[in-house]
Image (cartoon, rainbow, N blue to C red):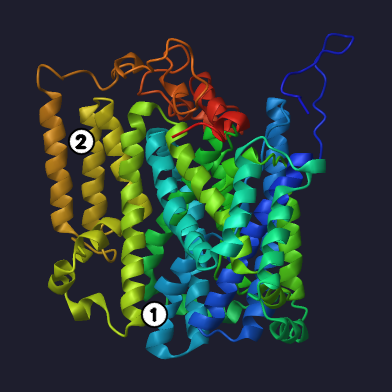
Amino acid sequence: MSADTRTPDETGSPTTLSLPWWTRGDTNAFFGLSFNILVNVLTLTTLSIAVVKIPSGDVLGTVLPALGVALVLGNLYYMVLARRLARRENRDTVTALPYGPSVPHMFIVVFVVMLPIYLKTNDPLQAWSAGLAWAFMIGVIVMIGAFVGPFIRRITPRAAMLGTLAGISITFIAMRPAAQMWEAAWIGLPVLAIILIGFFTDAKLPGNIPIGLVALLVGTAIGWIGGYMSAPDVAQAARDIALGLPDLRLDLLADGLGNLAPLLATAIPLGVYNFTEAMSNVESAAAAGDNYNLRSVLLADGFGAIIGSGFGSPFPPAVYIGHPGWKDAGGRTGYSLASGGIIGLMCLLGLFGLLATLLPIPAIVPILLYIGLLIGAQAFQAVPRLHAVAVVAALLPNLAEWGVGQIDNALSAAGTSASKIGSDALGQAGVVYDGLKTLGAGAVLAGLVLGTIVTFILDKRFRAAALAAAVGAALSFIGLIHAAEVDWAAAPKVALGYLFFALVCLAWSVLPATATPDADPPTEEAVPAPTSPTPTTSTAAAPDAPATTPPPDTTADSARTSPAAETTDSAPSPSESAPARAASTPTESSSSSV
């Protein structure tokens, strides 16, 4: 379907766009997103029962039904937003934002919020109530962020936001599925091959059979034929199926809010984490060509978290990583609601225990690896080539946070901890534990700060870099980044380091050879151009083409300089539309090299 341009009728007036409710690409994206959400719900179910020890009846009868209703209503809302944006821009290529339980969120609420309380009190209900209070506070902070987010988005370079998102996708989204695949590579690798060929190339299956469906069927068949699955487990799970309807758990929420003070040290930075991650996800969609209103997204996510906590779910759904992947797969406005509806129905019917025994994990996690690969690639493809260094800088805090988590989990399994072993002993083994922990604390916000600083330096905007470093110093001093908790003078040495960094940038800005106004940074012509005399179709190179790319102070970020960009779901401004369209073209974004 091609409806990106208006066709005049006999009177000369433009015709109204005929927007389909379902396309063939929606089928592909539906199976992909459904398996993505399925994996996440299976994971949070297992974590709630096995780690926090919440009774399985409460998880299947309260938590999942509340999540199921949120999935249906949230995806319905984002389908409406997508169709509204499509009609406003008169094109049928708009892709709805994916909505569901986020992988980083579920691990944070389980291991950072609920598990410590369970270990201290040995009471899973108290831990659950703390999770509900945390989710409630997250919702409040995200809704507050809806009013400051548009301004932050306008002043933050795209390389910083997409680089931070790439760090999350490579670590928390892609690494665990990759490890689970290689535990049973004979199941996971054939599935991955089908997904890579089907989603990253233009090769089609006979009859346009959905790639996601074929991948799941092939992986499941291999798992069962190879003896990976157990028939008795299926029979037992089938006997445990029970209908669950959402019910208000205001008593648990009130108990958690009554003991909220100890949670504020984590709720505030993690609320900022959720807000900044949502902001980066919206920017990722804009880079793929769909410029959604950030305030509308944040208000919906915050409201959903608050309502979900009242119904007993400590796992607030949100817009999460993956929009460019589903756009590349052909998804438009129908796939998201269909995915949320199917998974929501499964939550209400209590089918997740049965599904866990029917579907081999190595057969369904490759779709998460696909998302991780695509988001990581987009961070480099949707920014000027010069800013690739800033993307890598923004990756680092999430890599550090993931590494610390792996170390802590391994030591915990061995019955010890980093504090018991000591930094010196770990250092002798080549593990710079304290440095990794400091770098990774507040990883999302830290990645935004580092990416912003490096972007300004690359553009020779040294005064702006100094200001960004001063912001990093302030955030470190109060503990929002690079500190274990929010406190006054939480990380004074790190704050001092950022201040020294700012002084170096200020000193450099007054040197005669480099002193240039911040408002007039060097143009893209200063960046080495491709050696080929003919234009390239690679999306990685597209931002470097002088004919289509503005100077570094406006590339990718100029669409956010006008407040009007945040008041309506408008199209990207001309300065952003060229690289954004290059990043969103399926044939280019799926085949170009990073």
522 to 229, vertically: above or below:
above
The residue under label 2 is 466
- Splitting the image into 4 quarters, where does residue 417 fall? bottom left
Residue 111 located left or right of residue 430:
right
Q: Quadrant of the N terminus?
A: top right
Counting from the top left corner in percent of width and height, residue 210 is at 75, 48
Residue 475 located left or right of residue 398:
left
Q: Is residue 326 visible?
A: no
251 to 215, vertically: above or below:
below
Q: Residue visible at 66% across and 69% down?
A: 223
Q: Nearer the viewer, mark 2 or mark 1?
A: 1
Per the model, the C-alpha gap separating discs 2 and 1 is 38 Å
Q: Residue visible at 27% across and 37% down?
A: 453
Q: Residue visible at 37% across and 67% down?
A: 266
Q: Dot 1 lies on which element?
A: helix
Q: Which mark is residue 116?
A: 1
